[in-house]
Image: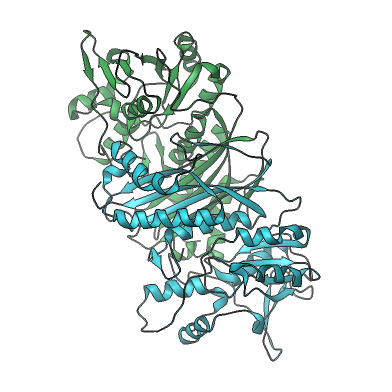
Chain colours: A green, B cyan
Amino acid sequence: MGKTVLLAHGGGGQQTQDLIANVFQAHFANPLFTADDAAVLKIEQTKLAFSTDGFIVSPYKFPGGDIGKLSICGTVNDLACMGARPLWITCAFILEEGFELSDLEMIAASMAKTAEEAQVKIVAGDTKVANHGHVDKIFITTSGIGQIEVENHPAGHKAQPSDAIIVSGDIGRHGAAILLAREKFDIEAEITSDCAPLCGLVEKIMPYSPHIHVIRDATRGGVGTVLYEIAAQSKVGIRLKTQDIPVAPSVHGLCQMLGLDPLYLACEGRLVLFVTQDMAPKVVDLLKSTTYGQNAAIIGYVDGAQKPGSVVLETAIGATTILPRPTGELLPRIC
Amino acid sequence: MGKTVLLAHGGGGQQTQDLIANVFQAHFANPLFTADDAAVLKIEQTKLAFSTDGFIVSPYKFPGGDIGKLSICGTVNDLACMGARPLWITCAFILEEGFELSDLEMIAASMAKTAEEAQVKIVAGDTKVANHGHVDKIFITTSGIGQIEVENHPAGHKAQPSDAIIVSGDIGRHGAAILLAREKFDIEAEITSDCAPLCGLVEKIMPYSPHIHVIRDATRGGVGTVLYEIAAQSKVGIRLKTQDIPVAPSVHGLCQMLGLDPLYLACEGRLVLFVTQDMAPKVVDLLKSTTYGQNAAIIGYVDGAQKPGSVVLETAIGATTILPRPTGELLPRIC
């Protein structure tokens, strides 16, 4: 089949069939994977979650993951944040003419492995090839369907006064890992992305769903952006305790050196949760019992005394400052 | 908001929110459009069709359509081909830094208009921005869910011996239109793309679904590629009557001049159907009663005397030749 992606691989003819058979079907094999225009699926529940996400991360391989793993995690996590059990994924590839087929195979294998861990099936796909220079190597868009089994699913507008705010682990590792992988800082730091599928973690806590008002994954804008979004959607004020926010020492060090705020570094495997105060310790314990939630912590609460839409930080010595609002891009092509 | 797309529009912060509010929500407004990570949807049927398609067409505006219209039609048509009623669409944009916001607005308006015609709701989306030169202007990936209401849905492996083969209109107009829009041939020809949503057309014929074995939309590879796919999937031989294949005079003229075969020119609003011989005239009549099916015609049949997987052409004088197999790319970035 040659060693690189050709324009003909996107032409819809025999070479496209070969690419699908040799790379995608080989890795994504499952009885639902369609040879037709759409996958036909049977669902038990009538309440669905439906989401899409495009991935253009550069570099497409990084410590702790690659664009393939990221593209599955991103959509799986978006579904999980609605309290849904992710079931099916589609993936659309846009490839640059000349892209190495061995790398495409590595990415497909990574997608298949992540899908298996998340217990989702890849059921349909699409491949387009653009001329050299018209797309930077590889972009992947995944879409997913999940079924919602709970009566009251979490949503961004459901935060309540006095809710505890939980993060499911130390923050900012994805952003820090991409920054180090891309730029030449001469900094020696062992930082791997937190990129991970979080549906198992959500499944664990969903029995307590009436108490879980909001779940959101902190992705490109980091935890700070998510908190401002939820403060606005739920029309509440938020108070964070700076010293309770888990940050890995290596990420902390990098932020100090570069003048960055870990609250605005991207994560790809971290949830932000708003949970009733009485149930919050139980939820943290459950999160800590999972692979990806071991550093879960309560980092603040919804503060009725704060202006709706605001996020304030309380420092270790009790001083209070306003968290700067998210704006602009810290780093393009982070995900 | 400025006049062009900035990297910050893809950063996930305030500018991303502004772009969503001012361009996408403004055009896609409907109660299901989500501000959360996934849209929450209620479905009546438990049998779904789920499909995805990436669009990288160049130029992104062409006679008869644009990438926005195309991106809705493509996914709507893929769902319709499974006999499904398209319900919901997600769209993921990958934009080049510097892209004109007025063009993005034109594209969003075009998507909204096409979605309305097809009676689908755009329920979720994603926007990424890549640096100048990392993506050529605009790529859109749409995904869709449809509900399947019939017992026996059509599929590519269901063609039967003696089935009549129908096309829903004259073929090759999308490919011809893009070719003329892109290249400088000094050819004066009025050719508009056939780009159209075909769900209404499928809905019209679905009452006869037990007789409709295969429906597929002939896209980038043209009708010839679809016929070879179905011949392989259904393990049947196909015989076409050359003089019965509808081709617009302008497309015919262009093909003569450039040495192209209209059977291998892309369509974006044409179905290929395999229907029991007794019911085929009725299906053609129903197709002809629709806006996009006026030139529907029976172009051949499944021929038990032919080798499975083969497609042969019968000329007006009765001679028989093998249709050359589809291979390579006629034109990159056709859709």
Q: Is B31 on the left or on the right of A65, as rendered? A: right
Quadrant of residue A297 within the rendered picture: top left
From this view, report whether residue B78 is shown above or below residue B332: above
What residue lies at 26% left-to-right and 47% top-to-bottom? B6
Q: Is A31 on the left or on the right of A217, as rendered? A: right
Q: Is A234 on the left or on the right of A19, as rendered? A: left
Question: Is residue B295 among the parts visible in the rendering?
Answer: yes
What residue lies at 30% left-to-right and 30% top-to-bottom? A265
From this view, report whether residue A45 is shown above or below residue A273: below
Q: Which residue is nearer to you in this view: A152 or A145? A: A152
For this orientation, the residue located farthest to the right is B278
Q: x, y percentage for residue A16?
A: 53, 61
Q: Which residue is nearer to you in this view: A322 or B218? A: A322
Q: Which residue is nearer to you in this view: A23 or A241? A: A241
Image quarter of the C terminus of chain A: top left
Q: x, y percentage for residue A196?
A: 45, 31
Quadrant of residue A118 within the rendered picture: top right
Q: Is B127 on the left or on the right of B200, as rendered? A: left
Q: x, y percentage for residue A94?
A: 43, 54
